[in-house]
Image (tube, helix red, strand yellow):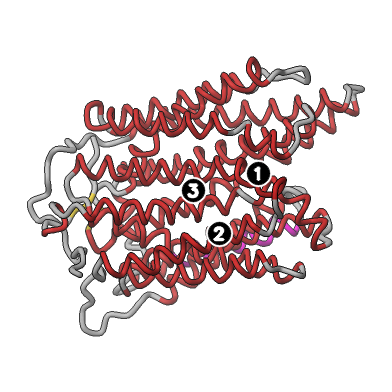
Amino acid sequence: MTTLNTSAPGNVTEADPRRWWVLALLSGLAFMILLDMTVVNVALPLIQDGLGFSDSGLTWVVNGYVLAAGGLLLLGGRLADVYGRRRLLLIGVVVFAVSSIVCGAAVSQGMMIGGRFAQGAAEAISAPASLGLIALLFTDPKERTKALGIWGGLVALGGTLGYVISGVLTDLTSWRWIFFINVPIALAVLLVLPRLVTESKMVREQGHRLDVAGAVTSTGGLVAIVYGLLQVAENAWDSAAVLVPLIGGVVLLLSMIVIERRARNPLIPLTFFANRTRSVINLTSLFFMAAFISYTFMLTLFEQHVLGYSPLQSGLAYLPLGFAIGAGIGLGTVLTPRLGVKLVAGGGFAGAGVGLILTSMVDVDASYLGGILPGMIVFGVFAGATMPAATNAALHGVTVQDSSLASGVQSTMQQIGGALGLAVLIPLAIRYTTEEVARGVAVEAAVTSGYVLAFRIGAGMMILGGVLILALFERVDPELRDPTAEIVGGTR
């Protein structure tokens, strides 16, 4: 069987219909990985009872994944570029499958937390390689926009359907199956991908060495910052538990900048950030994911703690969000070539902010149809519309050898954004609730007011992101092809 050649763009890959099968396979893998980020949320109480976690210990079932994924994504992107995207992708899939089995079979807290750390590391290894392969398989700008829209759509659906699948599995079977369901998808990727895709990596010069010092300082700095942000949920901002890792992370990242300026073969060439479009979309990805992750997290708590939904009801309540995101992605995929990345991404951010404002109008007597659903639909459609445009912008002007690095940077910013949203908005909601209760407000009303405050802050972050995109994005015609065929991605 012949394989698709991904060693360079502009080859037979462009006309080979099997590239769509590869896209389906990679999209399914991305769906599975992001699904596992959110699928545990509804099942956390059952995991706590089954393994005897304390309230504080239970947070590590989520935090372990975020720490490993957020801290190692940049390194994973560069390893894929240097040592081969297919190789790193397959390694990541193996690690993810094994760690999923470990989590599903966990009989102790340490076994569960270790498995979650390993799952996060597997995402850091495989996600940048996966997106890098997509960028190389689809070299035509219109086709790439469509392919990235499909990929981003399944990723987004994985994030939202995690709540639905978790509710169904935990009600009908056991929480252990939220991890075991990953294994068949991983096996399919391992069996099929090597038959369809050749190896793809940058050409290494004689004596080329990976920038180990840059890898250590960047990874250590990101892990420390993510860890510090997560500590805010249980500690004050001026506590040692928060300040020490945050300051340490900043020092490590500043050290990385010095190292990268002097390195012969830097892990992250500083010129990578010279492109204004890429820099702005990575910055605004922080706002997007902070608002998105905290929205789904807090809405789940509101439904179960205030409105009295069961886990299954809460999970099924997210189905319209998944459909809305899918519709938005389709709309964004169609509009991006016509209107350009700037208008689609900027308008999508602002529209998603409006959806959060609508959501912030809920109260203790809110109905699903009149209180939750309108904001959910608006938020989902506009958030989905941004996804193909944002992914295209993240790859704008990127050379072939840096394609996985570019996707790693974007994924890292998304992970950091999600951690930021949970670490900052949730404590704000809790503290506001406490103040309201102290003033004599009923507990359910006070809890709802805390969520409302957080929804509105998230809306402000989304709208700010849209303003930055509209003001700072470059304008590049997506129909123009770079004559050297060494650039992936084009935006307008």
Q: How many C-alpha atoms fall within 10 Å of the one at disc 3: few (<14), some, or many (≥20)?
A: many
| Side of 153 relative to 372 (left or right) | left
Q: Amino acid at mark 2?
A: Val
* Rendering coords of residue 209 (x, y %): 32, 80
The residues colored magenta run 240-256
Distance, label 1 to label 3, CA atoms, is 27 Å
SS majority, magenta:
helix
Which residue is drawn at the image coordinates 55% and 71% (left, top)? 98
- The label shown at residue 45 is none
* Rendering coords of residue 225 (x, y %): 59, 57
Nearest to viewer (mark 1 / mark 2): 1
Which image quarter: residue 361? top right
The secondary element bearing badge 3 is classed as helix
Which residue is label 1 attached to? 168
Q: How many C-alpha atoms fall within 10 Å of the one at disc 1: few (<14), some, or many (≥20)?
A: many
Q: Is residue 248 magenta?
A: yes
The secondary element bearing badge 1 is classed as helix
Which residue is label 3 attached to? 414
Outermost residue on the left side: it is 483
Nearest to viewer (mark 3 / mark 2): 3
Distance, label 1 to label 2, CA atoms, is 42 Å
Along the line of sight, which residue is nearer the eye, 378 or 399? 378
Mark 1 and 3 residues: CB-CB less than 8 Å, in contact? no
* Rendering coords of residue 309 (x, y %): 75, 32
Which residue is label 2 attached to? 250
Mark 1 and 2 residues: CB-CB less than 8 Å, in contact? no
Q: Amino acid at mark 3?
A: Gln
Distance, label 3 to label 2, CA atoms, is 18 Å
Quadrant containing the C terminus is top left
